[in-house]
Amino acid sequence: MSDRPHLLLVDDERSIREPLAQYLSRNGFRVTAVDSAAEARVRLNANAIDLVILDIMMPGEDGLSLCRHIRETSEIPVILLTAKSEETDRIVGLEMGADDYVLKPFSPRELVARIKVIFRRVASGGQRVTAPDGATYAFAGWLLKSQERTLVDSEGVSLPLSTAEYNLMLAFATRPNQVLSRDQLLDITQGREANAFDRAIDNQISRLRKKIEPDPKNPTLIKTVWGGGYTLSAEVRKL
Amino acid sequence: MSDRPHLLLVDDERSIREPLAQYLSRNGFRVTAVDSAAEARVRLNANAIDLVILDIMMPGEDGLSLCRHIRETSEIPVILLTAKSEETDRIVGLEMGADDYVLKPFSPRELVARIKVIFRRVASGGQRVTAPDGATYAFAGWLLKSQERTLVDSEGVSLPLSTAEYNLMLAFATRPNQVLSRDQLLDITQGREANAFDRAIDNQISRLRKKIEPDPKNPTLIKTVWGGGYTLSAEVRKL
DNA sequence: CCTGTCTGTCATGGGTTGTTCATGGTTGGA
DNA sequence: TCCAACCATGAACAACCCATGACAGACAGG
């Protein structure tokens, strides 16, 4: 986890969402605030989220459903916000995998305290681009082995990747055919924000292409999206 | 932690303590119930406590004081019970190192849910080298025998490890494919903090690689994660 | 007390990554 | 079609991080 943990705040009520996002920002967190579960799913995929704060009551998909989804697909901690005082709902939330809940109306200060408690617990294991244990991704004749952190070509020859190259490759392999901006890639691979005129990602892309593209000048795998970022254009199978 | 986690319940009011202890027992926990902070200190020393449930308001030494003591001397999680509804007290508790608090009157079912949340967290990321219980770990053609503190290769040849090397190897074997920072490794293997420019772990890694890597210059087992630490890239079976 | 092993510290060298910058490609409008 | 503005590329460089040999203090066994 980077210096400033990245929180995803999901609440449909603007009057809660915006001031809370501001408060959390002032307290040392990076905050992405969205107003629906659907938007939250997009952000979970695109960014490296360290913790989710989730309103239970929302139009469309509700918080409990999203919470279940998060728990099934990742280890990201979840704090539920609930206006309901009914005990059963809160307990259902905990049993569903939420790490904590906070009753509305709550004090922002208490929420921050609870967030810190969770990070204190998590601090030992958490790492950013963790691939599911031992997963292998197959695309375009390559095998990306997350356990060995290497690429293997169709003839079984192993190609060593540096740490940054591996992180980048994994970011693409888990999000094939998705355009990822430089900001997103920085966030995913290193959990940091871009400083002005940051060409770090460009450079890594260049180095990666030299390793995996048949003709690095005419990339067929990692394509440039002008003004947008990069995308891995290949079908990826997870083994 | 054994199958049935051992809880220490500290509350001076018998009308709460005894029924609650019973309820917790019926829900899969071993429970030691005491009525004072002093008694709690004795039990903490004498028994292997996995979690403490602590009333804040008690005659004599109060819960907050005991909580601070626990946090200073161990990693045992603490849940505070508090009758006070004042926000500040609860937050002070959290900031003092408690893992959670529950407001009186609370439902036992909710308390159990919260206990389980904490154990779930601890189980995934917990520190500490697991006690040498005579287990053997098999990975990449090696056997790490915790009883003999040696590595045995596929031909049965035994390779002696020094203490530090063994601790390091065990730390990896119990956390395969996890990136462990130098800080974590120092903490796990020696329980100490890194001082600035601490290269002790680097050196141990280097020595360990020379012993177990086919080609120490191109490590395939213990890999470097740039800016992150090291990881054991292998499938580990516990025998 | 001596000796050998173990382990932390230091210094040096090498690898990896971020930044800068000149160059060339892409885009949209004239 | 041409041009200006913008953007991407990749080489060169600098900063940073890591690997490892040498050394010395700590420690245990004789």
Image (tube, coloured by chain):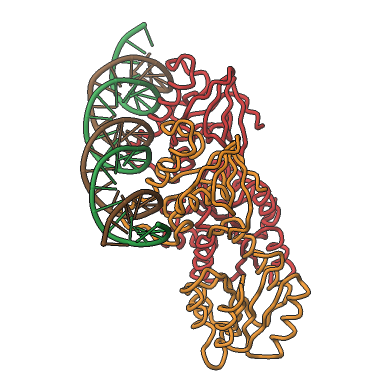
Chain colours: A red, B orange, C brown, D green
Residue at (48% x, 62% y) in the render: A19
Taking A213 as reference, is D30 above or below it?
Answer: below
Inspect this view and state whether residue A15 appears. no
**How many marks do you count on the picture?**
0
The residue lying toward the viewer, choosing from B207 and D1, is B207
The one nearer the camera, A80 or B136, is: B136
Q: Nearer the viewer, residue B45 or B26?
A: B45
Where residue B133 sits in the image (x, y, percent)? 62, 58
Up-down: is D20 above or below B82? above
In the image, residue B176 above or below residue B121:
above
Place of residue A221 in the rendered image (x, y in percent of width and height, measured from the top left): 53, 22
Question: Does residue A84 lie above or below A175 as drawn?
Answer: below
Please give left or right for residue A116 compared with residue A207 in the image. Answer: right
Q: Quadrant of residue B210?
A: top left
Residue drawn where x is 52% and y is 78% of the image: B67
Where residue A179 appears, as percent x and y from the top left, is: 53, 31
Q: Quadrant of residue A93?
A: bottom right
Q: Nearer the viewer, residue B181 or B172?
A: B172
Determine if residue B229 is in view. Answer: yes
Quarter of the view holding residue D29: bottom left
Q: Quadrant of the C terminus of chain A?
A: top right
